[in-house]
Structures are given as structure tokens and as C-alpha cells.
Amino acid sequence: MARHFLSLYLLIVLTLGAVSWGQDKLWQAHGGQGPADDKRLVVALFAVDNQLHNVPTEQWKPLIARLAAKAGVGLELFATADIVGRETLDKLKHGEVAYMQTGSATESWALKQLNEDYVLALKSAEPDAQRGLLDWTLTLLFYAAIALMIMIWIWPLTRDLRTLENAAARFGRRNWVFEAGIKPRSQIYALAETFRKMAARIDGLIASHKDMSNAVSHEIKTPLSRMQFEIELAQQAQTVADVRKSLSHIKTDIAAIDDLVKATMGYAILERADMSLNIGTHNFTTLIPAIAEYVRRNARPEVRMRAAVQSGADKVVCDMHLLETVLKNLLFNAARYAKRDIRVSFNVHDGVNYLFVDDDGPGIPEKDRNRALESFVQLEQSSSKKTGFGLGLAIVKRAIEWHSGEVVISRSPLGGARIAASWPAILPGQPVPAHK
Ligand SMILES: Nc1ncnc2c1ncn2[C@@H]1O[C@H](COP(=O)(O)OP(=O)(O)OP(=O)(O)O)[C@@H](O)[C@H]1O
Ligand SMILES: [Mg+2]
């Protein structure tokens, strides 16, 4: 960790240093023959030039030496023959001020031609060329400070990423519990949340697979041992009628296993990560009463079913196959537990679809409400009356979750259980339903 931090820090310092050095070089190569914008040099050169023209040529040298000594500047008289560089010579010929660096490139001169033989040269200050150790140290400190600021900003990010990495590693090694403890104000909070949800989903999948294999083996064991017993009976049977009787029992047990396989498969499909929905718009004002009527016909005769669907609920966005499964599971449960009255209602409120199934039966105790939504959970254990496998509500929950919604169990105004399923009226990623 510290090594990574240090290497990143050095990288930033070096990059900043390299960029600044490169910028300097570029400026020297393209922008500056010399301090081209230094008008003062030009003025000085023209002033000296003017003064020299009133003096005979042979007095130029001593006069220039005197001037240089007096002003404390590098003022010299060069022979035109000593000036190199075509461009420089051209400029001088046209009476312009030109710039030249001496061989060591540490000095820069501003030049002005006086006559054919002589050129007046004024030394310009070259801060870069004389950059001292202090200067370099200060520059380095400046960049080091910038790099430090960047690192202070990056530090919590690096720390949180490491925490997340550790949590992910622990998740794999240990009992599928993901605990990273990344604070909401962290830059990677959203990432950690995605991880947490993914981990919870994996955890849920593992748990449900465990439940499923436990339940399946348990549910299969009873009919299997009954079948074994019936086969033995058939083997010892004296009459054809006895054999037929055993065969008929075996057939019932096979049907029970078949039901279990079908129910389990139906649930397993909903547990798959790659399930795709067949989303469409459906007219609930006719569909819900039709399904309610179908369930009523298959229920005890005293059961009364009422369907209250908000008028205008004719373009409800959902996967109808899944929603039909949801409705049938909820209504068959209600029909099993209701004394008499069942009410199914649907309405849309604030962009959310609400489906309620109410009954006047015993209801589901508060402590069991979450558990009842899990797979293979049946609350009353009287095995003599046992029907189903405890998959209905788990299927309902999963199907609604596929619609980005949720299922909540509460007490119904009718006195029994209320199962409320809600999901967004416009599903994320789905086109807004077209109004016909
Ligand atoms: N309307 C209801 N009133 C009272 N209890 C209910 C109601 N609906 C469900 N339950 C309880 O919740 C349990 C789970 O219901 P679920 O629909 O998941 O399974 P099941 O109906 O027993 O079997 P399956 O649906 O697989 O045929 C039921 O066993 C029952 O105890
Ligand atoms: Mg059920």
C-alpha cells in the first residue's frame, strides 16, 4: 500500500517536473531567440546607436567601454564578421534588433548594426541560464506540494478501494457475508453498494439452493418409500384387484413427485440470473376479473370473490404470464384460508401499480410474514392436510422482484391476510407504453 502510494507520488512529481522542463525547452526553441518582448533593450540599443553617430568611428570602442562601466551592463562592440547565422545577419542588415546566444548558450545578446563593420551588442538578463540551486529547489518544492495535494485527495479513495478488496476477498473465503463498512460520503460508496447487493443476491441464491435441495429430497423421500411399500405389497398380492390397487397408489405418488418437480422448476426459472421478461401492456380491467372467476370456480362453494380494478387500468406494464402466476398463487392461497370473502383490487397511484389480495381467514402472524415469503416454507405443519410445497409466495415475491417491485404481507381490513404487490408503472429500461 505504502509502496503504491509512494510510486504514484513520485510519478506525479516527475511528470510535473518533466512537463515544466519540456515547456521551458519548447519556449527556448520556438518562442525565444532572446527576450524578444523586452522593449527596453531595443530602446537602449537605439539610444547608444544615436549617440555613436555623432562620434568618429575610432572613438566608438573607448566610448562604449565607458558607457558599459558606468551603467554596469554588458555593452560591447562586435565585428560584423563575428556574427553568425543567416537569419540574424538578415535582420541586422534591415536595421532591426536581432538576438544571439554565445557558444555556451548561457548568455544572450541583443544586436544592432552600426555600420558595415560593427555591430553594437547589449547583454540581456537570462534568468533561466543562470538558474541557481535555490531556484531549482523552490520549483521542485512547488511541484511536490501540488503532488501532495493530489495525493491527499486520492488517499481516501485508495484506502476505501483496499477495504473493498479485503471485504470481497473475505466474502469469497468465509461464510458469504459481505461487510465492507464504506461510508456514504466515500467516492466509491456506489460501487460498494453494488457489490453489497451482488453479494446479497449470491448469498440468497446459495441459501435458496440449499433450501431447494433439502426440501426436494425431503419431499421426494415420502412418496418414494410409499412406492417401495406398494411394490412389496403388489409382489405379495394374491389377486389382480390388489395389484391394481397398489399400482393406483404408486400412480398417485408419481403424480406427487411430478407436481414437486414442476413447482420446483417453475421457481428455479425465476431464480435464474438470466431470466428475460416478456413485458407488454395489458388490460387489467378484464384480466383480473377473469382470473378471479377461474379461481372461484375451483374453490369451495361458499367462497365469495370480489374484484375491484381501477377504471382505466387497461395498459398495465407487466409480464402477463408472471402476473397470472402471481394472481393465481395469491387467490388460491386466499381461497384455501378465507372463511368466505376474498377481494382482489388493483390501482395505480403516483406511478406505482398496486395489487392487493385480501381475505377474511386467520391471517399470517406478524412474526411469520417474512418467512412465509421464502421458498419451501409452510406455516402450519399438520402434515395430514398438507397440500403444496410452500413455493407459492416465494414465486410471487420473485416474480414481482423481476418487475422491480416488492411484496408485503399485512393484516387485511377483511380480518385475514393482505398480500400487497407493487411495482413501478413504467419499468426501468422499458419503453413508455404507447397510448392507442
Ligand atoms: N391467505 C393466507 N392466509 C393465511 N395463511 C397464508 C395465506 N397465504 C399463505 N399462507 C401461509 O403461508 C404459507 C406459504 O404459502 P405458499 O403459498 O408459499 O405455500 P403453500 O400455499 O403452502 O404451497 P404452494 O403455494 O407451493 O402450493 C402457507 O403454507 C400458509 O401457512
Ligand atoms: Mg400457495
Image: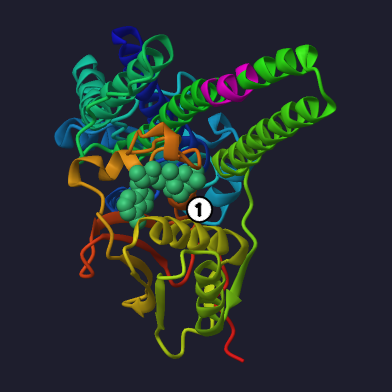
Q: Is residue 422 above or below residue 4?
A: below
Residue 78 appears in view: no
The residue that mark 1 highlights is 399
In this rendered view, identify the residue nearer to me: 298 or 315.
298
- x and y percent of residue 301 in the render? 46, 70
Percent x, y of residue 41: 31, 48
State the SS at label 1.
Answer: helix
The structure residue drawn at horizontal position 84% and vertical position 27%, both measured from the top left corner, is 240
Does the magenta run of residues contain 122? no
Say which of 116 and 4 sits in front. 4
The answer, for residue 380, to whether it is visible in the render is: yes
- Is 221 part of what is drawn in magenta? yes
Q: Residue at x 56, y 41 (%)?
A: 267
- Percent of width and height locating residue 234: 77, 18
Using the image, determine if residue 22 lies above or below residue 167. Answer: below
Residue drawn at (44%, 59%), measured in percent from left and top? 330
